[in-house]
Amino acid sequence: MAIDRKQNIIDAATKSFSLFGYKATTIEQVAKLANVGKGTIYTFFKSKEDLLDEIISSVIVEIKETAEHAMDPDRPFLENAQRALYRIAEFRKQHPLTIKLLQEIRDIGTPAVQEVMKRLDRAIIAFIREKIDNAIKKGEIRNCDSEITAFLMLKMYIALSFDWEKEHEPLPKEKIAELFELYFLKGLSK
């Protein structure tokens, strides 16, 4: 019963954060949506920030699973990296909570939201770094600083998937893959 109430609170908070954002969500709203008293929420979570942190932990697991499912152990690293990054970018673009939280960062700059989104990015970078390290060990790619490479891969994919669209036509998945291969694997040298 307690697990059901806790999950009910998490679901209600996720819904409220997705609709109204972190800053505009109150514990009272979450309690009302979850059909519990405020005190019940505090038996499971110390604060609204603690509740958001729990939700982001679940989102991190979900993103990693999404990326993992996109990869095929029989395919080369580059192809798997592109497939995983595409799924990560699509997840961020389509998941109601990440959409709202990124919008809140842009519009308000709420510190708690900035922190959880940094945590999300760090988790994604760690996931990519692990895949890069494995590819280096297998001899699929040359030795490199895997943390910097993972950071750049994620930021490039996000830039091509989101930032480019702000002032240009959206790039098709194939074009992003082509650019990713050009700049990451081949470089610009002749």
Image (cartoon, helix red, strand yellow):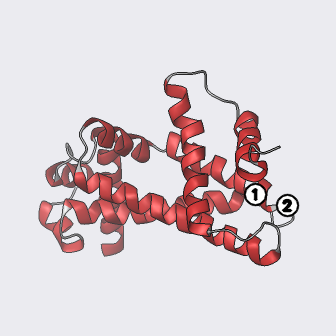
On the rendered structure, is 23 left or right of 74?
left
The amino acid marked with disc number 1 is Asn
The residue labelled by disc 2 is 75
Q: Where is residue 125 in the image (x, y as percent from the top left)?
A: 54, 62
Q: Name the residue under label 1.
A: 80
Q: Is residue 147 left or right of residue 186?
A: left
Residue 81 rendering spot, x and y as whole percentages: 71, 56
Q: Specify the label residue 166 is tagged with.
A: none
Question: At x 28% / y 43%, what residue is drawn?
Answer: 21
Sequence-wise, which precedes: disc 1 or disc 2? 2
| Mark 2 nearby-residue class (10 Å; few <14, some 14–19, many ≥20) | few
Q: In which quarter of the image is residue 74?
A: bottom right
Residue at mark 1 to residue at mark 2: CA–CA distance: 6 Å
Residue type at mark 2: give it.
Arg
Q: Describe the element under mark 2 as helix, strand or loop.
A: loop
As displayed, is residue 155 above or below residue 74? above
**Residue beneath the point at 19% across and 73% down:** 43
From this view, report whether residue 86 is shown above or below residue 103.
Answer: below
Residue 1 seen by the camera: no
